[in-house]
Image (cartoon, rainbow, N blue to C red):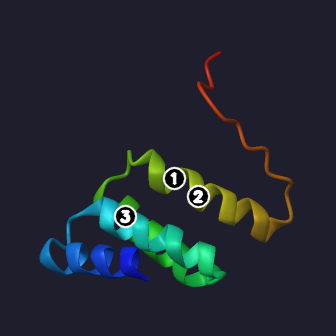
Amino acid sequence: AEAEQHFREAARLDPAADMAWCGLGVLARLRGDRSEAAVLLERALTINPGNLDSQRPLAVLRAEESGHVVRVILGNPEE
């Protein structure tokens, strides 16, 4: 709850703060609110299309919605 308040305040102070929208999206996903998570992560990507912290959870959401199995790779994907 405290993290969400901080992300909301950051987004209010700077609507172009993509990491604030990303954080809100990740928290929405953790709460189980998948549709809100997608909206927030897409907003982060509209601001910064190269934001991998938004791309990855959004890709997982979309894969889950389509019924695909998701593999999570930890560490350096180029290893």
Report if the CB atoms under discs 1 and 2 are less than 8 Å apart: yes
Judging by the rendered image, the residue that carries numbered circle 1 is 55
Q: CA distance from mark 1 to mark 3?
A: 9 Å
Mark 1 element type: helix
Task: Give the quadrant of the C terminus.
Answer: top right
Residues 7 and 46: in front is 7
Judging by the rendered image, the residue that carries numbered circle 2 is 57
Q: Residues within 10 Å of mark 2 (few under 14, many from 20)?
A: some
Residue 68 in the image, given as x and y percentages of width and height: 85, 57
User: 57 left or right of 8?
Assistant: right
- What's the residue type where badge 1 is placed? Gln
Q: Residue at x 37, y 51 (%)?
A: 49
Q: Residue at x 38, y 45 (%)?
A: 50
Residue 11 in the image, given as x and y percentages of width and height: 24, 75
Judging by the rendered image, the residue that carries numbered circle 3 is 44
Q: Earlier in the sequence, mark 1 or mark 3?
A: 3
Task: Examine the image and state in which quarter residue 10 appears.
Answer: bottom left
The mark found on residue 39 in the picture is none
Task: Examine the image and state in which quarter residue 37 appears.
Answer: bottom right
Mark 2 element type: helix
Q: Residue at x 58, y 58 (%)?
A: 57
User: 8 left or right of 40?
Assistant: left
Q: Residues within 10 Å of mark 3 (few under 14, many from 20)?
A: many
Q: CA distance from mark 3 to mark 2?
A: 12 Å
- What's the residue type where badge 2 is placed? Pro
